[in-house]
Amino acid sequence: MRKNIIRFLLMILSLLIITYHGFSNDPRFSFHVNAGMALPLDENIKSGFQSGFGFSYPLSQKASISFNFSYWKSRVEEERNKLLNGKMTVTPFTVSLQYNLIKEKYIIPYIFMGIGLIFTSFKIDDYVTIPEVTLTQKVQNGISVHLGVGANVRMRESWVFFAEMLYLHREAGAETRISDMNFGVRIEEFSVNLSSISAQAGVKFTF
């Protein structure tokens, strides 16, 4: 897991270096905020309100790179041999390459794709066990990939409204840790499908 995070951070550093040389002749960039709904594909993980912010750098007239931080919470319903009833928090940090399908117009459709680092926490609801037994569950952090479509609508010279839909793919490892005062600790491993479809909208401000 640590190696994956190091590789991800090195990739971000490389993209920043490439970006610096790519837009050094036009150092304008944009900041954005957005909100929407995250719709997990796993039926046991319910939809949740998603919010986020980020910034973008131009690479050319039609291409750009963007960094986005998002956050959403969801209720989880118990599934046999997997997660129990509880609350899940998902915090994606994603990097996307965006390509505008047409040049400067009032409405500019675009496509994008990229990778991300997904941080996940899970808390079990009150669970009744015998006093000698303690039960906890954990979902691992890790790498994801995503792709999507969207459109920019220019409101003013520096303000842009945007709306987009994206698919995020993430299969996460998870574990149930059962601590028994009489028999020790037992760990049961399983996987959780964190893949989701998000619909979101927001505004961009160009500096």
Image: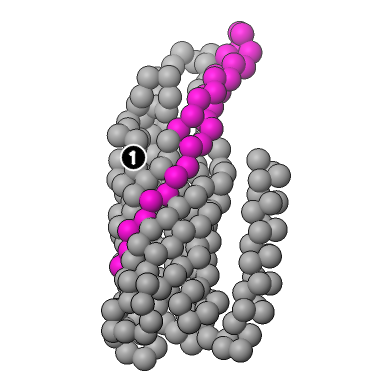
Q: Residue 67: horizontal and vertical position, in percent?
A: 52, 66
Residue at image mark 1: 41
- Say which quarter of the image contains residue 21: bottom right
Vertical placement of 191 versus 75: above or below? above
Frontmost residue, 27 versus 180: 27
Q: Residue 167: horizontal and vertical position, in percent?
A: 38, 51
| Secondary structure that dominates the magenta span | strand
Q: Residue 81: horizontal and vertical position, in percent?
A: 43, 19
78 horizontally vs 143: left or right: left
Vertical placement of 163 versus 143: above or below? below
Instruction: Determine the secondary structure under disc 1.
Output: loop
Query: Magenta residues?
Result: 163-192
186 horizontally vs 31: left or right: right
Frontmost residue, 24 versus 78: 24
Residue 48 visible in image: yes
Vertical placement of 162 versus 95: above or below? below
Q: Residue at x 50, y 69 (%)?
A: 66
Q: Residue at x 32, y 33 (%)?
A: 44
